[in-house]
Image: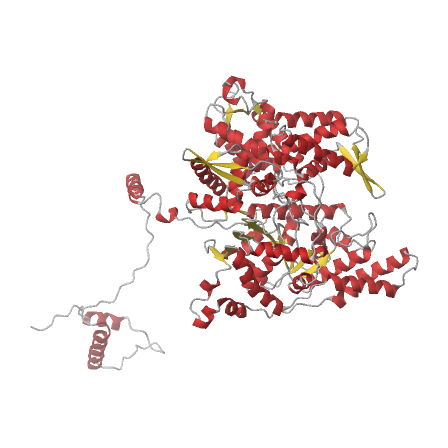
Amino acid sequence: MPGVSVLPDLDNVYAKWEKKRPRGHYGSDYGSHVNGQEIIRKGADGKQKWTNKFGNNIQLARHHRAREKRVIAIPLETVRNDTIAMFKTTPTILPDDFMKTRPLMGQCCNLLPNSQKDLSAPSNLGMRNILDVAHEMRGHSLLAQRFCYIAYSLSRKTTHKYTDVSMAVLTSQRVLDAVEQAVLKEKHEKGVSELKKQARKILQGMKALVSNYLIRFTGWFLFQFLGRILNTVQVHKSQMEIIKAASERGIPIIYLPLHKSHLDYILVTWILWHYEIRVPFVAAGDNLRIPLFGRLMSGLGAYFIRRKLDIEVGKKDKIYRSVLHSYMEELLRAGEAMEFFIEGSRSRSGKALPPKGGLMSVVMDSLNTGVIEDAYIVPISISYEVLLDGNFNNEQMGIPKVKETFWGALKGIWRVINSNFGSVRVDFAQPFSLKEFVQVCQSASQPRRDSDVSPPSTPLVSMETLRRISESNAAIYGTSVVEEEQRQLVKRLGEHVVHTCVRTTAFMCTNLLSFLLLTKYRKGVDLETLKTDYEWLIEEVMVRKRDVGFSSTSKISDVLDYALSLLGSNLVQKRTTEGVVTIYPNLQLPDIFQLSYNSNQVISVFYLESILVNAVIFLSDLSLINLSSLNSGDVSLVSRDDILEVAEQLCDLLKYEFIPTSPLMKLEEVLADTMDQLVTMEILSVHENEQFCPSYNTYDRNWAKRISASLSWADEEDPDDDIYREEQHFRVNIHKNDCVDKLVFFHRILAPFFEAYLVAASHISTSLEEDMSEDDFFQSLHNCAKERVEKGVASYSESAAVDTLRNALKSFEHLKIIETCFAGNLRIIGLHEDFDVKNKLIQYITLLESLRE
């Protein structure tokens, strides 16, 4: 049977084509001279070509003109059915939601949006143990795996060139002006050439002599040394990817770690060497310029500066300051990275110290004068399970610090080699632009028309003014900036860096255990209860977007046993009675200071909550001793405004202990958000005034305020809003035991500091009737605090710490209760000249008395 074609009969089609054929050039029909047989032949040829191209069973697709079609609405019932079906078939929680990844700490705050988006990396890269070189050398030759440390050290790139800026420093205008002024001031007692030699000698003793060979050798040596005394050195891979990307931008990087140990000097350099990043020039105290160790540190990038820049009190050494300033400035001009400790010295209490602005002002001055276009600021936090430097118990007891010597350093190394210090974790925060920070501060100083944000009390100076100040030859600033505006800007930068460092800190197992023992179980706790609360504390830390320095999925019993072994029997004691294991912290002087050192690092997680709880306790006149016997009606109502006002006063009182928030943010707003969290935790219950407006509750008010703020409706003050805010009151929830336990827990976090400040205030009231030497007064105060502990009068023995008592005096001087001055080389302390100073002192004593248990 012959095949049947699916193609249509094309003869009729060809006939139609012939009728519609194009015309000739001169109006005649195209091809009119062609006979009929030729047309038939060509038609057959076209049919054959069609068949060859498309086959016998394909038709050419027809393209229709697109027509506008009316969109037909989907029936509501269909949408409802599809939605219900999707809800029933799609899992609410996906398997990935159960995966726990290590959080990426140190992200830039939202007020620095450009820096936040500029450098980023995937947050799920996880941690890396720097000491685990064997893992890195997998896949290499057997010889490389056998001698992995040597092979790995040789594979690191250490061919960076570091600029020698000596000539630029000595010929800088700043140094020459300082020499000229010194000649004029000393009335030509020393010639210009002699003072130039003095400047050259200062520079020779100060400058770093970076050696790539020494860096490589030290990298190998630290594998041997740290591998013997540490279990791990952890870094976050994502953080290091960001730092490496920043180092390739050609912009100077300023590394600013918190200072806890002498190991900090080389730890950051060692980690950067691992990632083949240029090592920074590190500012170190000249007390570390001892034989052998000083040369080693200089080869690793350390430059040495005096602990006190001026030898004579009240007399600035302008030549030394000018050499230091010019040396740092020329390093920045050459694009070198720098590292210095923003606190100035090691913390003896475990808390971050207030920032020192001296060296930071040099960087700021270099930006203002155009020496550098910008700089990346990298806050760094280093967490130790056990401090390599030992403890600071003697210094907290008032025993003077022993000066570093060569033999003392050798003894310290021998002690360290024969000990185990657990693990170390180093966190690099996301770099932020110094230029953007300055711009944000400048914009924050200008009142906005579409909001009720008020400018800060101290206005920030513009960039042009800063540039004019810096370029002026009227004075040589050295490492300090005499203009108040620039000083305030440097102060804000320092506080922002310290606050970022604190928020970046990961808490080690010893920190959490010490914190629990000193806040909840000072009288001891059985091991099972401790395990439960230890797990609860980890969850509370993680919920507040902070991290721990160990795996959160580890078995709690193993983590506790490990932490107990690291703390040792001199800090915690384990006793077994009738099969029940009980843990007791050592609360005696001076060992309590070591536990307090570990515990204080965790306080920042709960600081604002503790501040607000103590404000509520003061306003409610609560006694935590008989709290369980109170009825709901016995607890006073406290207004929102009063709580915020007292909380801000407490933050101001403890300003030398903690930085509550970044200076880019408003403290009142952060406290208000934290108060909402206390309501969510049901520690505070909101009292609604139903007689005033029963349908307008707290939730509605907060919702309306957020909407109004986001839409910029609140251009003018709304009197009704003030009325509603004034009517918002709170009452402590004493009906639930867990809420009461949280209230007591938050109170005890800051209780040792309030007791120390109470001791200081009381001693000022009784022992400072007339001016006296500050050293004598402080010695009397410290003896009084220690006697209270020895007699059992003190509730918290750590309140006798030297650092806390010194900060208390600084705070009372800031509050204009006391004042100090110099009489020659002697520092004198006395009551402030304010006529109402005694009433003010009594008010603070009353406040602090109410916060005692």
User: Quadrant location of residue 368?
Assistant: bottom right
Q: Position of residue 514 (x, y in %)?
A: 53, 40
**In-image side of 390 versus 780 (left or right):** left
Please determine whether, in this image, residue 417 is positioned above or below residue 532: below
User: Quadrant location of residue 224?
Assistant: bottom right
**Is there any visible trace of residue 276 in the rendered image?**
no
How does the figure colour the protein chain or chains? secondary structure
Camera-side residue of 387 and 105? 387
Quarter of the image for the C terminus: give it. top right
Camera-side residue of 776 and 69? 776
Q: Determine the residue positioned at 86% across, 64% down.
A: 194
User: Quadrant location of residue 838?
Assistant: top right
Q: How many marks?
A: 0
Q: Position of residue 86 (x, y in %)?
A: 30, 44
Camera-side residue of 165 and 737? 737
Camera-side residue of 138 and 514? 514
Q: Furthest residue to the left?
A: 1
Q: Position of residue 716 (x, y in %)?
A: 62, 33
**Is there any visible trace of residue 89 in the rendered image?**
yes
Please determine whether, in this image, residue 820 is positioned above or below residue 341: above
Q: Position of residue 688 (x, y in %)?
A: 51, 22
**In-image side of 145 versus 252 (left or right):** left
Quarter of the image for the N terminus: give it. bottom left
**In-image side of 355 versus 68 (left or right):** right
Please determine whether, in this image, residue 169 is positioned above or below residue 340: below
